[in-house]
Image (tube, rainbow, N blue to C red):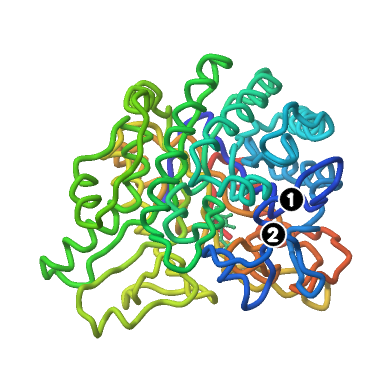
Amino acid sequence: MSTNFPQGFLWGGAIAANQAEGAYLEDGKGLTIVDLLPTGEKRWDVMTGHIDSFIPSAEEYYPSHESIDFYRRYKEDIALFAEMGFKALRLSISWARIFPNGDDESPNEAGLQFYDNLFDELLKHGIEPVVTLAHFDVPVHLVETYGSWSNRKLVHFFEKYVKTVFTRYKDKVKYWMTFNEINMLLHLPFIGAGLVFKEGDNQKQIQYQAAHHQLVASALAVKACHELIPNAKIGCMLAAGTTYPYTCNPDDVYEAMEKDRESFFFIDVQSRGEYPAYTKRFFKDNDLTIKMEKEDAALLKNHTVDYIGFSYYSSRTTSTDPEIVKQLTSGNVFGSIENPYVEKSAWGWTIDPKGFRITANQLYDRYQKPLFVVENGLGAVDELNSDREIHDDGRIDYLKKHLIEMSEAIEDGVDIIGYTSWGPIDIVSASTGEMKKRYGYIYVDKDNEGNGSLTRTKKKSFDWYKKVIETNGASLEN
Ligand code: BG6
């Protein structure tokens, strides 16, 4: 099967500060929400907004505290990315490295310097930094003191933070993104927006109010980016994956449309610049009243994103049949039901390459703006054999099938500007906190309990991806 990718296509990988850097209190960094996520059973409760302490407990293990120590090892890791020929690396800035409490008067110079060094190192290797401003990373002080994104004040603190980093890195970074997987706020509200709930709270009300604040903050970030770095592009970021109706029963079809709209809502605002018509009915049916300021409508309208960044791991399936609904796939935060036509990963995530093509077409039809695939990949167990090699053929197969479908989408006319696969080096899993769930072309010696030398080892997929990039996607063979 021949593939076709445009010249200048941005091949690379994507990581996030909280899952890679470690050094969680180093050089003045403040505590962020992810630093409160333990491994094990409690993790889910915290991620969904049920937390009783804002201080890490001595009894728990918090994988973000060390992660893979990218903070100290970034030069070694970037050299490996460069060896694979990366054109781009998507990474995030940790807000709390720049403003440790979030509401500080002035920024933390050591934090700013770290990202200067990091961007310089990337640029030295000809790798374009693609920077997410917020990847599950609210300073804990803002959660404790203000109730995080439920409070309008966060808009102002965020604006100050983004203006600081735009000004500082304006000559180094040309691709920006506002909130990682902004729709995650509805599924994992603590991770997505630092939201914590008390008994009796109207959670939906709090979530949509927080969403409004993030949407306004996103528009202000777009505005500031365009003013401060006119030659930069700034996008949004959606956890994408089209929803299939389980049957052609119109009830199922409508349900699938509604599920997709739950996510599209965010991008409709960020890209089209206004609340979509369907939200009126949704807010009415759910008895939600969102407080908006006079200036918000114009801000949203006038400062829309330049491109649509999205992650794609899986498609989703939904049904209105109470019996079918019981068949939830495990491990999927979007609560999809089993789709008998596709396979699943070891963590129960649907593997659906064709769904990738469908999703890309759907997004392009809807927004008609360039798309940037900023996450895709297979979380799998990797074992070193007796020669200390890792033959991750399953990963190669997953990626190959997805790249073929991405090429098909491009042939369909979808404008895709780049592809940064998730976790090009093994990092901590966001949903489970495990190291065992690996996505990388580079193995990191560390286990779920935090043991290991952190040594980096190339997997078989390393050379495979190198060839993919070298041939601009023409060679996908294993
Ligand atoms: C996305 C996130 O949800 O999926 C990443 O943006 C995350 O932060 C990735 O790591 C894969 O999910 P997981 O749970 O397998 O790490």
Viewer-side residue, 220 vs 201: 201
Viewer-side residue, 240 vs 382: 240
Q: Position of residue 400 (x, y in %)?
A: 50, 57
Residue picked out by circle 2: 54
**Front: mark 2 or 1:** 2
CA distance for labels 2 and 1: 9 Å
Q: Position of residue 342 (x, y in %)?
A: 37, 72
Element carrying mark 1:
loop
* Ligand 1 within 8 Å, label 2 CB: no
- In the rendered image, the residue lying farthest to the left is 250
Residue picked out by circle 1: 31
Q: Which mark is residue 294?
A: none
- Image: 416 above or below 32: above
Specify the quarter for ligand 1: bottom right
Query: Residue at position x 72%, y 44% from top?
Result: 81
Q: Residues within 10 Å of mark 2 (few under 14, many from 20)?
A: some
Q: Residues within 10 Å of mark 1 (few under 14, many from 20)?
A: many
Query: Residue at position x 65%, y 65% from top?
Result: 438
Viewer-side residue, 398 vs 337: 337
Badges 2 and 1: C-beta atoms under 8 Å apart?
yes
